[in-house]
Amino acid sequence: MTAQTKIKRTVPQAVFESKDALRAAALGHKQACDELARMDVRSLGTGNPNHPINDGIFGYATADLMAKQYEGSVS
């Protein structure tokens, strides 16, 4: 096999929808949210929607915007 040959691999959707995968995704999401909640928001880049300079972006308070962003996500 040469360096230019690409192997296409397909992973069945069931792998991502298994109880273990969904549990891992939910745990990862919770850990990321907890870490974000502990951060000093002033240390974030101004392009981050959680930075105080972006309060009121799109007409929503940051907390409301983030809640809408994650509506229906794995929890």
Image (tube, rainbow, N blue to C red):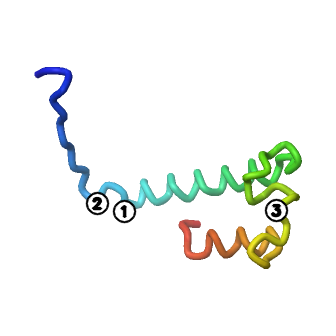
In the displayed structure, would residue 42 be above or below residue 68? above
Residue named by callout 3: 54
Quadrant in which residue 63 is drawn: bottom right
Q: Dot 1, how many residues are within 10 Å of its Cα: few (below 14), some (14-19), or many (20+)?
A: few
Residue named by callout 2: 13
Helix, strand, or loop for circle 2? helix
Quadrant occupied by the C terminus: bottom right
Q: CA distance from mark 2 to mark 1?
A: 6 Å
Quadrant in which residue 8 is drawn: top left
Question: What residue sits 17% from the left and 36% below the top?
Answer: 7
Q: Dot 3, how many residues are within 10 Å of its Cα: few (below 14), some (14-19), or many (20+)?
A: some
Expressed as whole percent of the image width and height from the top left, the position of residue 24 reads: 50, 52
Expressed as whole percent of the image width and height from the top left, the position of residue 53 reads: 87, 58
As rendered, which of 40 and 42 lies closer to the eye? 42
Question: What residue sits 83% from the left and 47% below the top?
Answer: 39
Q: CA distance from mark 2 to mark 3?
A: 37 Å
As rendered, which of 1 and 67 lies closer to the eye? 1
Quadrant occupied by the N terminus: top left
Give the residue type that dot 3 points to. Answer: Asn
The answer to the question of whether label 1 and label 3 lie on touching residues, with beta carbons closer than 8 A, is no
Expressed as whole percent of the image width and height from the top left, the position of residue 26 reads: 56, 59
Give the residue type that dot 2 points to. Answer: Gln
Q: Nearer the viewer, mark 2 or mark 1?
A: 2
Q: Dot 2, how many residues are within 10 Å of its Cα: few (below 14), some (14-19), or many (20+)?
A: few
Give the residue type that dot 1 points to. Answer: Glu
Q: Nearer the viewer, mark 1 or mark 3?
A: 3
Q: Nearer the viewer, mark 2 or mark 3?
A: 3
In the displayed structure, would residue 45 be above or below residue 37? above
Upstream in the sequence, badge 1 or badge 3? 1
Residue named by callout 1: 17
The answer to the question of whether label 2 and label 1 lie on touching residues, with beta carbons closer than 8 A, is yes
Expressed as whole percent of the image width and height from the top left, the position of residue 62 reads: 80, 68
